[in-house]
Image (cartoon, rainbow, N blue to C red):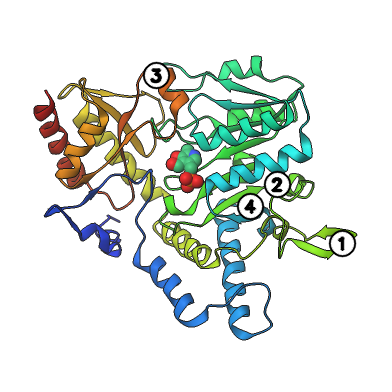
Amino acid sequence: MTQEELNIRSQFSILYEKIYSKPLIYLDNGATTQKPKRVLDAMQRVYEHLNSNVHRGVHYLSNQCTDLLEEARRVVARHLNAREDAEIIFTRGTTESINLLAFSFGETFCKSGDEIIVTELEHHSNIVPWQMLCQRKGMTLRVIPITDDGELKIEELDNLINDKTKLISLAHVSNVMGTVNPVKEVVAKAHAKNIPVMVDGAQSAPHMSIDVQDLDCDFLVFSGHKVYAPTGSGVLYGKREYLDQMVPYHGGGEMIDKVSFSGTTYNVLPFKFEAGTPDYVATIGLAEAIRFVDEIGFEFIEKHEQHLLQYTLSQLQDHYGVRIIGNPKRRSGVVSFLLGKAHPYDVGMILDKMGVAVRTGHHCAQPLMERLGISGTVRASFGVYNSEEDVDTFIRAVRQAAIMLS
Ligand code: PLP
């Protein structure tokens, strides 16, 4: 099947907008994706016909919304191949999921002197919460370095792991270079020493099928809004053996079993980690977005996006003073580059005037920028609705920018 046969683009009306009278070429999918009509419809249906707070009511509407929310949990659990629905915690996104984990895991399993390992290519979301934990507890953050090509120096992990290591937390895919990290290899090394592993799936979830049992990771997080779902939806997957033991993150309604002034007991999984009214409408939208990608299938998505990625690299490489940042053997979703000595922001501004939306800057990965000795990049990132024509327009715009900035 082709993209046209699957009628993918036509489901995203925003792709037909004009920007400065030019057709929109949306290549900022790593920041957020657009939403298909079926996701918007699913949310609108809730607000127009079913809206009521979940888990608390005896009445019809409340039960309907609760059923849809719990169905969303089943959809996500099946999508990730979790062992059980209760291992799926709904959050507002990757950042909240990692903060939840850093707090709850940290309070339960960590003490002064312990260590957490991250990598040099992480997004700030997978650095700062661990730094905060380290500060709170008097712990140390260790870092797996990368090669000049932007790949993990996996052999260094053996030197970093020791009996103080409590967790390894790494991105599945780099949001700057698209490097696909060897998660299974990291998990194997970690598990050999009984150390759990958290995978930041923010940039892998939109582009590849994820099987948490196959990866054997202990935690995996992602944001709905990068997978064609609404903002305010997100997931923390965790193995029950850890989640059951972990103290809650937020206190409030729904996460309790019984509250009294002499002491409070907590609810069972997953509700122990879902205090307060959740963004159930966004989460119902997330389920529809997951159905959308699963119906297309990741076989098609990966093949289509890899084609666009390779086509872009071949068109960009060695042209117009372009320097591609990172040269990983396995790359997914994004291409970062610099144009001669031009500031990425100036390149982005010129592309914008031609209707091409890309991201510029440090991409919330300042330690990676420092390692690469640059202040930022221009980043084009792909979604299932992008086409070869999008890439052609993008390349023409880069050529134009090169002329203007030379
Ligand atoms: N981790 C990675 C690898 C990302 O690319 C991002 C967002 O760009 C995040 C974490 C944070 O995601 P969010 O802002 O949706 O919480």
Check disc 3: other Cα within 10 Å, few if <14, some if 14-19, many if 20+.
some
Tell me the residue that label 3 is attached to.
372
Q: Nearer the viewer, mark 1 or mark 3?
A: 1
Indicate left or right for 38 with 352 as reference: right
Q: Which residue is nearer to you in this view: 30 or 390?
A: 30
Q: From mark 1 to mark 3, how far is it between C-alphas?
A: 54 Å
Circle 4 SS class: loop
Q: From mark 3 to mark 2, how far is it between C-alphas?
A: 35 Å
Q: From mark 2 to mark 1, how far is it between C-alphas?
A: 32 Å
Indicate left or right for 390 with 298 as reference: left
Which comes sooner in the sequence, label 1 or label 4?
Answer: 4
- 87 versus 349 height, above or below: below
Q: Are marks 2 and 4 in contact (CB under 8 Å)?
A: no
User: Residue at 20% of width from left, 52% of height from top?
Assistant: 24
Tell me the residue that label 4 is attached to.
82
Which comes sooner in the sequence, label 4 or label 3?
Answer: 4
User: Residue at 58% of width from left, 82% of height from top?
Assistant: 61
Tell me the residue that label 1 is attached to.
261
Tell me the residue that label 2 is attached to.
239
